[in-house]
Amino acid sequence: MQSYGSAPHPMLGDGYPSKSAFGQPRKSINIGSLLACLLLPWMVFTAVYSLSSLSMHYESPELVTIVQLLCGGLVLLLGGAALQHMRKEDGQPSWYIFLFLTTALALVAGSVLGNANFTYNMVPFKDVSNMNSYDLINPTTGKGNQVMDAGRVKFVDEAKLDLTKAMGFRNLDTYCVVPIVTGKEKQDNYDFWAVGTNCCSSHVSDFHCGEFNNPQAHSGLRLMREDLRAYFRLGVEQAEAAYNIRSNHPIFFYWMQDPQTEISAYENACYTNWMVGVFVAFGIQLLLVVAATIGFAKFG
């Protein structure tokens, strides 16, 4: 219990006890300091998460790094203040420690979750949007090296998947490939392939990825993930050996009817995840502040 002559606690009121409804002394809570504990970690999370998730990361990645470093410096300052206060209070827990820990957690969570949202949603959207779109490509006569900058391709209406030549390469996941053709005759070269993950068997031609059974599907959305490309290339090599075919410059697509809708879905998913993350982070920080207030009050 704080005496009348003691210095005011930075996170509590003026240091003077008041009377509760039961006649017991109590300390008034400094609302401004509680708001700082609520808002500062959330603002750090929001700044880092927003810049890491959205288009600014794609256009100016150095700005994201600068903001992360500045927030890291703020966390270090809070850590120093918490350490200094612990020494004065003989290791007793305090709001300084709470503010330091939650701000550090906010920085780490904002960076990790923001980069994940950026990698899986914003990068595919930006990459495909910045590439060319081709119409009426004939997969029988066309060559992969002629459309290396393709992001979206609309094939001729006769284009389809040759499901008899499907192949799957297994490495933990199964990476499925099937050539895009226009007829039943064997081609000299197969450069256009539809792909998918874990939607086929590694030993039977049973490709069922994407819109494989949609008769209106004659388009492809380019595979942009570099970490998957090598596995699909191995699947093509297996297909070449199994079916005695050749693919000089394979290009991989997700088979679908409307690539533009899928591209928009990437963008919508990115902004939806961003909005949900910001509101959830505020809710979590609010719960932490309430729990800490109750805990500190209970244990003095």
Image (cartoon, rainbow, N blue to C red):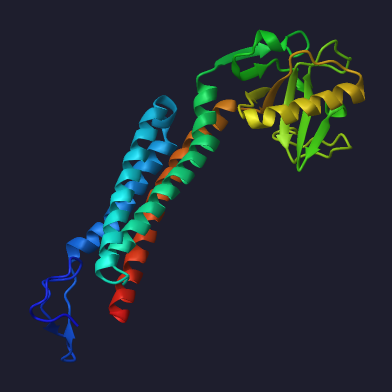
Q: Position of residue 257 (x, y in %)?
A: 64, 28
Q: Position of residue 45 (x, y in %)?
A: 36, 48
Q: Position of residue 229 (x, y in %)?
A: 69, 27
- Hey, which quadrant is residue 56 in on the image? top left
Residue 216 seen anywhere in this rendered image of the structure? no
Q: Position of residue 240 (x, y in %)?
A: 86, 21
Q: Residue at x 16, y 75 (%)?
A: 28
Q: Residue at x 51, y 22 (%)?
A: 129
229 w.r.t. 203: above or below? above
Question: Is residue 4 left or right of 221 when viewed as pictured?
Answer: left
Question: Is residue 292 left or right of 1 when viewed as pictured?
Answer: right
Residue toward you, 255 or 257: 255
Residue 31 seen anywhere in this rendered image of the structure? yes
Question: Is residue 79 left or right of 211 when viewed as pictured?
Answer: left
Q: How many marks?
A: 0
Question: Is residue 179 left or right of 44 when viewed as pictured?
Answer: right
Q: Residue at x 49, y 36 (%)?
A: 118
47 w.r.t. 14: above or below? above
Residue extending furthest toward the left: 5
Residue toward you, 283 or 48: 48
Quadrant position of the C terminus in the picture = bottom left
- Hey, which quadrant is residue 93 in on the image? bottom left
Residue extending furthest toward the bottom: 22
Quadrant position of the N terminus in the picture = bottom left
- Hey, which quadrant is residue 3 in on the image? bottom left
